[in-house]
Amino acid sequence: MKGYTLLELMVAMAAGMFLLAGVSMSYSAIKSTIVVTQELSHAQEVVRYTSQVFTRSIKQTNVSPVVSNGLAQLSVYQSSGSISCHGDAPIFDYTEDYTLVNGFLVCAITPTAGGDTVTVNLLKGVNTLSFDILYSDRLVRITITPDNVPDLFENGIDIDIAVTRPIIGQF
C-alpha cells in the first residue's frame, strides 16, 4: 500500500494547525506593536512641536507669562521685532495667547496698542492642554495630552520651561 494512514494525516493536520495558530498570533502581536508605535510617534511629534513653540515664546519674553481662564490660556507679552507664533516679527508690541480649540493648539496675536487679533491654528491632534506658573513666575509648566496617546501618558506630558529673561534681569 502506498500513501498515508488516517492517523498520520491527522497528526500532520494538527501540527499544521498549531503552526498556523502561532503565525496568526505573531501577526496579531506585530500589528498591535505597530499601532502603539504609530501612536507614540504622533505623541512625540505633538510634544516636540509644542515644546519648540513655547520655548521660543517663553525664552524671548521680557515679562513673566500669565495663565488665565482656569489654567486653559497662556498669555505671553512680546516686544516689537520678536518672532511671533505666526513666524513673522511684528513691528509693534503684542501679546500671544495660546489656547486649545477643537483639538487645535491655537495662537492669537493681539497688538498691545489695540487693533485686530489674528488667530492661527498651530497644531492638530491635541486632546487636553493646561498651563501653570510655578516658582514665583520663573517656570511655566505646559501639560499636554496628544490624541490617541497610549495609556501610559493618559494624564498628559509635562513640559517645563524657565522664563529666563526676567530671571537674568533680576541680577
Image (tube, grey):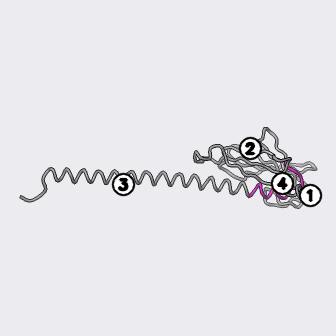
Crowdedness near tag 2: few (<14), some (14–19) or many (≥20) residues, C-alpha within 10 Å: many
What separation in Å lies between label 1 and label 3 (alpha carbons)? 64 Å
Q: How far is disc 3 from disc 2 in space, using C-alphas? A: 45 Å
To which residue does mark 1 refer?
Answer: 169
Q: Amino acid at mark 2?
A: Ser
Location of mark 2 (residue): 130
Q: Position of 85 compared to 23: left or right?
A: right
Q: Residues within 10 Å of mark 1 (few under 14, many from 20)?
A: few
* Viewer-side label of 4, 3: 4
Magenta stretch, main secondary structure class: helix
Residue 113 magenta-drawn?
no
Q: CA distance from mark 1 to mark 2?
A: 27 Å
**Res. 62 image quadrant:** bottom right
Mark closer to the chain start, 4 or 1: 4
Residue highlighted by disc 3: 23
Q: Which residues are magenta?
A: 52-65
Residue 90 position within the rendered picture, expressed as x and y whole percent measured from the top left? 87, 59
Query: Could you say which disc has been placed on residue 163 in the image?
Result: 4
> Which secondary structure lies at badge 3?
helix
Task: Tell me if label 1 and label 2 are in contact, CB under 8 Å.
Answer: no
Mark 4 → mark 1, Cα distance in angstroms:
11 Å
Hey, which residue is sitting farthest top in the picture? 70
Q: Position of residue 145 (x, y in %)?
A: 66, 46
Question: Mark 3 or mark 2, which has the lower sequence index?
Answer: 3
Question: Which of the two marks, 1 or 2, is nearer to us in this view?
Answer: 1
The residue at 80%/39% (across/down) is 69
| Amino acid of disc 3 | Val
Image coords of residue 114 (percent x, y): 92, 48
Dot 2 falls on a residue whose secondary structure is: strand
Q: Nearer the viewer, residue 89 or 54?
A: 54
Residue type for callout 4: Val
Proximity of marks 1 and 3: CB atoms separated by less than 8 Å: no
